[in-house]
Image (spheres, rainbow, N blue to C red):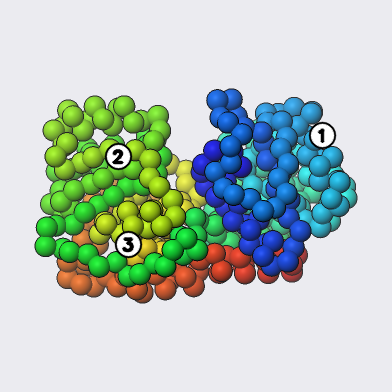
Amino acid sequence: MYGRGGIQCHTHWLAKGLKEAGHEVAVLSPAPMSGLTDELFYEIDYTLETYRGGFSLKGITSIGCIACSGGFDVAVVCGTGWNAMLGVLLNRRLKKRVFFEVMSGVRNGKLDPRDLVNYGFDAVVGQAPAVREAFCSNFQWHGISASIPAFPDPLELATTISEPIQDLSKGLRGAYFGRLEPHKGVGFLLDNWKAISTSIESLDIYGDGSQKVELEKQIHRLNLASRVRLLGAYPQGAAYVKLLQQYHLTLLPTTGQEGAPLVLLESMACGVPFVANGVGGIRGYINEDCQITSGQIGEFVPALRALCDRLTSGKVDAKRLQNFYEKNFSFRALSGKWNSFLTDL
């Protein structure tokens, strides 16, 4: 729960949704990592307990003790930590144990804490169909499994989101939102700017990460500063909606092991179409108004051109995209799916 990322976002809104449905909810979180404060990014109205991070007997035992004190019906483990996996296995008072795969379903070497699902977990949930299938295959899981998306930041709760009204007369404006890491593909956008710039007029890049300095140098070296900007962190809530709706499309050329990135759901909520490389669970987001490749990065630029052509010819329907989000990925929709799954289990 400390820091800002997909796991924190999902865990917070899952807890909120289950509490609103009338359940008693407690979140057990690793204490802040070195260098982070104990300040929470979200305002919470549920029980929050912390335990020692890193693989340790103290961490494992503390989870077991905390969970025992409540006598909970179900524990949902989100992440890949040994402490959480072993802690809920050792707590014999728990009635059901669920593992939620928010990564890609691919193993992290020979020794992976997710192997422990086969020693006492009751169900596995993947955040997209492809993630669920990959996990079941890679970890030889043959028990109950389901595909339920992770919660994005539910922008519809922060503000009234209208259909974006955008001027196309000065060319299309593209944006990237997310971590600046090599596998996310921002460098690919810069390397291929000559081809990309025939379709979009400008690209704004939001986020932070290990590749920031390298990308700054690359923009300078390629003389792209007049059309490509690195703009740092982006806001949340109503300010995020206002910012997103300034763009005609968002781009995600990731080539790494992905789950199902939440920024794409947030783009949908605002009626802003995206083009993405279809790795991991991204293809679970396929809809009429966005372009998703088969997972081959060589298809990305053609997919971008196709989406831009559809935008300029008026074939992208922002309201239809928002309705698709509302039906499948909104706070109301996902709260209902998770509540039904856990109750049925």
Residue 284 visible, this angle? no
Residue position marked by numbered label 3 in the rendering: 272
Spatial distance from mark 3 to mark 2, Cα to Cα?
19 Å
Mark nearest the camera among 2 and 1 is: 2
Q: Crowding near pointer 2: few (<14 within 10 Å), some, many (20+)?
A: few
Q: Is residue 245 left or right of residue 73?
A: left
Judging depth in this view, the residue of 129 and 55 nearest the camera is 55
Residue position marked by numbered label 2 in the rendering: 231
Q: Which mark is residue 61?
A: 1
Q: Crowding near pointer 1: few (<14 within 10 Å), some, many (20+)?
A: many
Amino acid type at circle 2 is Leu
Which mark sits nearer the N-terminus, 3 or 2?
2
Residue 47's place in the image compared with 164, above or below, is: above
Dot 1: element: helix
Dot 3: element: loop
Amino acid type at circle 1 is Thr
Q: Is residue 31 left or right of residue 322?
A: right
Q: Is residue 329 left or right of residue 213?
A: right
Disc 3, disc 2: CB below 8 Å?
no
Q: Quadrant of residue 182?
A: top left
Which mark sits nearer the N-terminus, 3 or 1?
1
Amino acid type at circle 3 is Val
